Amino acid sequence: MSPAPKALVFDVFGTCVDWRGSIIAEGRRLNAERGWKIDWEGLVDAWRGAYQPNMQKVRSGQLPWTHLDVLHRMALDALLPAYLGGTPKKAVRASDMERINTMWHRLKPWPDAVSGLRRLKTRHIIGSMSNGNVALLTNMAKFASLPWDLVFSAEWVRHYKPDRETYLSAPQFLGLKPRDVMLVAAHKSDLDGARRAGLMTCFVPRPLEFGRAFLKSGAYDAAYEKRFDLNVRDFRELATALGC
């Protein structure tokens, strides 16, 4: 590996937190509380499926700059009717829609995430590097005890990953060179975008991000790649590799 990074920035959804399991669990609690029959597994998969296409509308100029909470709500409004499962549409009030949309603010961390980040923080600047907006990422950090030194968000530069401007925002704001900053992510396309911008990269597989059925299908790519500066099992192994 090249010289150790001075700062580490982390993809958040899927890399640090279990978005799918968290939303399904909160949704099922809401079903029980309200007597609903919403298909949360189907909804959350479709909701996440709208993530990249809606961001691409912003990248392409089809939509003006629109932060992720708003994009999530646009997708939820369009998708929810197909997953009500017998729940009357009128039973889901405006306040319920807001509660559902902000489920993305209340995502649980993977078991190694908080302890690994705390170790890494002892020797490195650590922060998010996410397409989430600032309010979302800040609320999530409070909820999940993610110990960021600072939040890097696509909202600061009004560009969504994999736009170069997003990755370069971390070294620019920190007064560092791109090669002094490492992106840690579970998604290879994200890491490739960071590599093109000159950042160091670390791959951390999260085999359960999309659920056990997806993992059993063999569709998840957990293979280590030589093009990344580091490949590690989890954040604790990363901390050990970096001497933390």
Image (cartoon, rainbow, N blue to C red):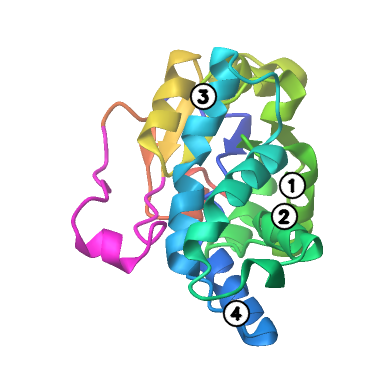
Q: Does residue 95 appear in this view?
A: yes
Of circles 4 and 3, the one toward us is 4
Q: Residue at x 72, y 19 (%)?
A: 157
What kind of residue is marked 4?
A: Trp
Provide the residue designation for mark 3: 56
Q: Which of the pair 146/24 is nearer the observer?
A: 24
Q: Give left or right: position of 41 versus 156.
A: left
Give the answer, above or below, for where 198 lies relative to 125. above
Provide the residue designation for mark 2: 140
Mark 2 element type = helix
Write down the region rendered in magenta.
204-225
Give the answer, above or below, for where 97 lies relative to 35. above
What is the spatial separation of the Cα atoms under label 4 and label 1, in whole angstroms? 26 Å
What kind of residue is marked 2?
A: Met
Of circles 2 and 3, the one toward us is 3
Label ID, residue 136: 1
Task: Sort mark 1 into few (<14), some (14-19) or many (20+) by Cα contacts within 10 Å.
Answer: some
Q: Quadrant of the N terminus?
A: top left
What kind of residue is marked 1?
A: Leu
The x, y position of residue 199, in whole percent, is: 51, 21
Whichever of labels 4 and 1 marks the residue nearer the N terminus, that label is 4
Mark 1 element type = helix
